[in-house]
Image (cartoon, rainbow, N blue to C red):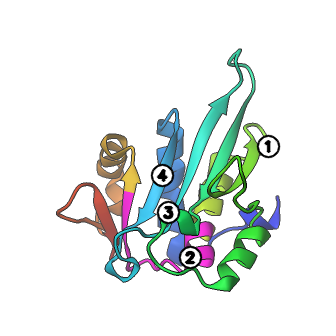
């Protein structure tokens, strides 16, 4: 297992488990935005998008981390170093975001979820006390409600499907 997929630790484990469940249920992928006030209108996000070849036989995960083009807060220089350490390529003419492509059979959903958590936590300094938004929201609502073990850990916000860890 690559170092970028190492376990996220006890405090973030519930978040990684939630993302694993979402990735298993979302056929096209998942986006997690940090929507906390300290990030303003456009906070950082990470997304994993499932891409299939034209025959539907081989597939990959396009994993993206937001670039400064899509956020409203300055990005500290160490963010770029951390994203590179996590395996991301810098934005280029083909992708406005930091990105990496992972073979569908080369990474488990749990490893992918841990990478997404580390992207938010280590790359963008997200905190468990921040508010998060999930897309697709209809699916996230179903998954969150089905996870009875998280009812004491998550509380829903009033606007859309936003949640916080208690």
Q: Which mark is residue 31?
A: 4
Q: Earlier in the sequence, mark 3 or mark 1?
A: 3
Which residue was labeled with disc 3? 70
Between discs 4 and 3, the one toward the N terminus: 4
Can residue 153 be seen in the rendering of this structure? Answer: no
**Residue 140 visible (yes or no):** yes
Foreground label between 4 and 3 = 3
Q: Is residue 139 above or below residue 88?
A: above
- Mark 2, residue position: 124
In the image, residue 142 above or below residue 99:
above
Q: Which of the two discs, 3 and 1, sits closer to the camera?
A: 3
Q: Closer to the observer: label 3 or label 2?
A: 3
* Distance Cα–Cα, label 4 vs label 2: 15 Å
The image quarter in which residue 36 lies:
bottom left
Give the crowd class for mark 2: few <14, some 14-19, many >=20 residues within 10 Å: many
Neighbor class of circle 4 (other Cα within 10 Å; few <14, some 14-19, many 20+) is: many
């Amino acid at each position: 297992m690559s170092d970028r997929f190492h376990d996220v630790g006890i405090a973030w484990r519930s978040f990684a488990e939630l993302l694993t469940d979402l990735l298993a249920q979302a056929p096209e992928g998942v986006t997690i935005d940090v929507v906390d006030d300290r990030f303003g209108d456009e906070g950082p996000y990470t997304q994993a998008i499932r891409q299939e070849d034209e025959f539907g036989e081989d597939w990959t995960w396009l994993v993206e981390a937001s670039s400064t083009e899509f956020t409203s807060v300055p990005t500290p220089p160490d963010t770029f170093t951390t994203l590179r350490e996590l395996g991301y390529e810098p934005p280029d003419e083909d992708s406005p975001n930091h990105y990496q492509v992972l073979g569908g059979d080369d990474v488990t959903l749990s490893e992918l979820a841990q990478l997404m958590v580390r992207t938010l936590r280590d790359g963008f300094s997200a905190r468990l006390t921040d508010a998060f938004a999930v897309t697709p929201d209809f699916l996230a609502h179903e998954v969150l409600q089905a996870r009875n073990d998280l009812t004491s850990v998550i509380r829903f916000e009033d606007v859309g499907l936003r949640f916080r860890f208690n």
